[in-house]
Image (cartoon, helix red, strand yellow):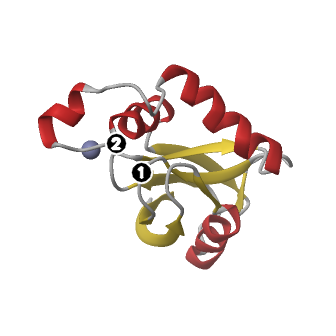
Amino acid sequence: MRVESYTIEVELEAEKGFADITAQVQEIVTKSGMKRGIAVVFNVGSTGAVTTMEYEPGLKKDIPRALERIAPRSESYEHHLTWGDDNGSAHVKAALLGPSLAVPFTDGRLTLGTWQQIVVINFDTRARRRRVVVQLLGE
Ligand code: ZN
């Protein structure tokens, strides 16, 4: 078994910046020459998340809207008292979706559904350059 690490960087807008990184992750798998294994896709930082979704304009509104109901931006957060930060809502949303994803690949192809893309979401209250580590474990 081999282990290889790569990094993807994406510029994301504040609060609900989305990026579809499916093609980049597939390119990494292809470049590695590995035929089967797992691609772990991990967002570095606690106000961003990695998940899968059908990447279309409606869901890009629905997902933040649903999370906004659970952790509204306008509410007060203990986190703000800890650091004088304003992004308690962003931390909660990111923690709910989680920072990483493990995607199996076989025959050198990610085993994603046709309407299933790998996305990075920035929930922070400012625009962020997000670093996503892609670690391949396979052969
Ligand atoms: Zn914070």
Quadrant location of residue 78? Answer: top left
Q: Position of residue 42 (x, y in %)?
A: 44, 52
What residue is drawn where x is 22% and y is 35%?
A: 80
Identify residue for label 1. Answer: 125
Q: Position of residue 89 (x, y in %)?
A: 40, 34
User: Is residue 74 found left or right of 21 in the rendered image?
Assistant: left
The earlier-in-sequence mark between 1 and 2 is 2
Quarter placement of the N terminus: bottom left
Q: Pointer 1 and pointer 2: residues touching (CB < 8 Å)?
A: yes
**Ligand 1 located in image quadrant:** top left
Identify residue for label 2. Answer: 87
Question: In the rendered structure, which amino acid carries the disc numbered 2?
Answer: Asn
Give me the C-alpha separation between circle 1 and circle 2: 6 Å
What residue is drawn where x is 63% and y is 63%?
A: 21
Q: Closer to the camera, 50 or 71?
A: 71
Q: What secondary structure is found at the residue carrying circle 2?
A: loop
Q: Position of residue 122 (x, y in %)?
A: 49, 52
Farthest-out residue, right = 114
Question: In the rendered structure, which amino acid carries the disc numbered 1?
Answer: Thr
Quadrant location of residue 77? Answer: top left
Farthest-out residue, top = 70
Label 1 lies in ligand 1 vicinity (Cβ under 8 Å): no
Label 2 lies in ligand 1 vicinity (Cβ under 8 Å): yes
Quarter placement of the C terminus: bottom right
